[in-house]
Amino acid sequence: MAGILLVEDDPSVRTGLELALARQGHSITAFGTGEEALEHIRARRPEIVILDVMLPGIDGVEVCRRIRKLDSLPIILLTALGDDLDVVVGLEAGADDYVIKPVEPRVLDARIRAILRRMESASTDRITFGDLMIDRGALKVTLDGREVHLTPTELRLLLELVRHPGQVLNRRYLLRSVWDHTHVADSRLVDACVQRIRAKIEPTPGDPVYIHTVRGFGYRFSGP
């Protein structure tokens, strides 16, 4: 299935996840520190990174930030139960999804497969809104002629919004259609992802032209 980089400092947890994910057909490379993971990514790019937040040395959030400076590859955070601040900071740093520890391998595998589906989804048309051009076939976004580098999740969310121009899409719908989530508490995934997209495509992210917030409901996409 996927070439996965697993970063987890607890040897027993790391070994357990390696075995469980390997049984699901994934190819796993595992490290116990963020430093080792970053070195590996520079040498050999994985398809997905599964990243523990609490790591010795460089913590998972900082590893996430550094990965985002290099690449848009998908990142799933492993975070302890109740560490909501870690989740929020990690999502703001560029993570695509998160799983609460102790990790249920079936849940983690489902999140991985959802990301793989997002990476494979494509269409065959180009859409232009002002200076923003979205090529659904090439899965490429350009702004004023310059390519905008979006993660697979950011791209999938943008495509979902663009499919319904002028319509308000609530967070529950977006969670289901983009992340395959059904739990409304995960709505911060949507908010953080919208913020990251705005930072990349909006001339003034605080005063958006393309993705508008409809308070109490969700988000609406419209051209300038």
Image: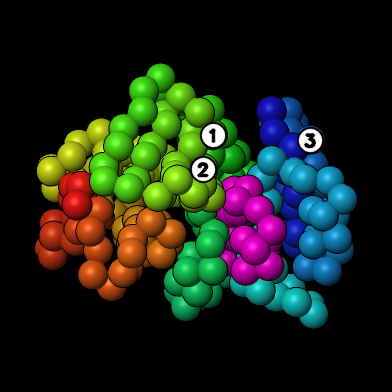
- 99 and 146: which one is in front? 146
Identified at 18% across, 47% down, the residue is: 222
- 179 and 147: which one is in front? 147
Q: Position of residue 27 (x, y in %)?
A: 79, 35
The residues colored magenta run 65-79
Identified at 36% across, 23% down, the residue is: 125
- Alpha carbon of mark 2 to alpha carbon of mark 3: how far? 20 Å
| Residue 90 numbered mark, or none | none
Identified at 63% across, 48% down, the residue is: 73
* The N terminus lies in quadrant: top right
Q: Earlier in the sequence, mark 3 or mark 1?
A: 3
Q: Position of residue 144 (x, y in %)?
A: 40, 50
CB contact under 8 Å: marks 3 and 1: no
Amino acid beneath label 1: Met
Amino acid beneath label 3: Ser
Q: Position of residue 133 (x, y in %)?
A: 37, 40
Where disc 1 sits, the SS reads helix
Q: Earlier in the sequence, mark 1 or mark 2?
A: 1
In the picture shown, does residue 62 fall above or below 64?
below
Residue position marked by numbered label 1 in the rendering: 119
Residue position marked by numbered label 2 in the rendering: 152
In the picture shown, does residue 90 fall above or below 141?
below
Amino acid beneath label 2: Pro
Identified at 75% across, 77% down, the residue is: 58
Closer to the observer: label 3 or label 1? 1
Residue 116: image quadrant is top right
Q: Residue furthest top?
A: 124
Q: Is the residue marked by circle 3 packed among few (<14), some (14-19), or many (20+) residues within 10 Å? A: some
Closer to the observer: label 2 or label 3? 2
